[in-house]
Image (cartoon, grey):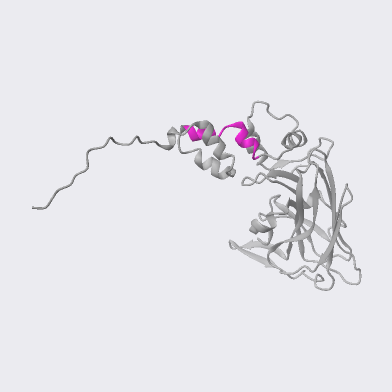
Amino acid sequence: MGLRFSSPPSESAPKYGLGELPESCVAEIMTYMNPPEICKLATLNRAFRGASSADFVWESKLPSNYSVLLRRIFDDFPSHLGKRGIYARLCRLNSLDDGTKIVVFLCRQVWLDRSTGKLCLCVSAKGLSITGIDDRRYWNHIPTEESRFNSVAYLQQIWWFEVDGDVEFPFPAGRYSIFYRIHLGRASKRFGRRVCNTEHVHGWDVKPVRFQLWTSDGQYVTSQCFLNGPGKWAFYHAGDFVVENGNASTKVKFSMTQIDCTHTKGGLCLDSVLIYPSEFRKVKAFLNSS
């Protein structure tokens, strides 16, 4: 007969679950997570849900100058909202006025990127100064679902091409890039399918367009490139600028020109100018094409 060995009975170890973690401890951990991760964890249980509402968690995700942003964007911001509510409100598409409290409806929008809390700003074609825009022989505003503003400026043909714009805003400290969102050809839908008319596209391969930007603190950048790739939207990088003081407004002027009058150019759709944190050039695929 073989020998039998048996271990003496032991007391069962106490079982702990995520619900046993102190709310303050969970909140400290959440400060190291990005907003989407925090929102997902908030669905686990009551402790995580409570921790996800802590003001210090969301204050760590807000831009350091968020109080300045609130005064600039909103006339009367609700005082009862906590930091989570402030973050959510700033992540919406917020329209900007022109400094005289006259709202430029759907011409300028500002928001925080939901995943990073970084500030983004967009100016529609209607918010830009475009040479010849009032002459329908050259330009037309056409409706489209492919723009966040539901319309774009379409150039049929012109000799002197110039698009200027400016923004004065308290950007949080950091490095920003300016992009022109452009489409060669006129896109439309036929029998439910996207088609692109390129019959007016010409002149952009003869001479490059020139981009320039200036800031109120003396920064200046210039570059040039040819426009190509008809049939799809492209983001053309106009340059970068650096903001050091987020509590003061920085004025940025930018332009896109092709003023060589030896040839005409046309067949271009201009949607908007976007100002994004420069780091998005690596992590946002839509800044390459769409």
Q: Is residue 267 left or right of residue 215?
A: left
Q: Residue at x 19, y 44 (%)?
A: 6
Is residue 103 visible from the viewing direction of this image?
A: yes
Q: Point out the stretch of residues depicted in magenta.
A: 47-61
- The answer to whether residue 133 shows anywhere in this view is no
Q: Position of residue 126 (x, y in %)?
A: 79, 50
* Residue at the extreme right: 261
Is residue 261 a member of the stretch shown in magenta? no
Q: Quadrant of the C terminus?
A: bottom right
The number of callouts visible is: 0
At which x and y percent is residue 143? 71, 54
Residue 232 found in image quarter: bottom right
Q: Is residue 50 magenta?
A: yes
Q: Relative to 43, is 28 on the left or the right?
A: right
**Looking at the rendering, which quadrant does residue 144 occupy?**
bottom right
Magenta-drawn stretch, dominant element (helix, strand or loop): helix
Q: Residue 96 versus residue 276: which sits nearer the camera? A: 276
Q: Residue at x 76, y 60 (%)?
A: 237
Q: Position of residue 5 (x, y in %)?
A: 17, 47
Q: What residue is rendered at 71% in x and 62% in y?
A: 234
Between residues 205 and 87, which one lies in front from this camera angle?
87
Q: Looking at the image, which is closer to me, 96 or 267? A: 96
Where's residue 190, x and y in %?
62, 63
Q: Residue at x 73, y 41 (%)?
A: 95
Furthest-left residue in view?
A: 1
Along the line of sight, which residue is nearer the eye, 76 or 175?
175
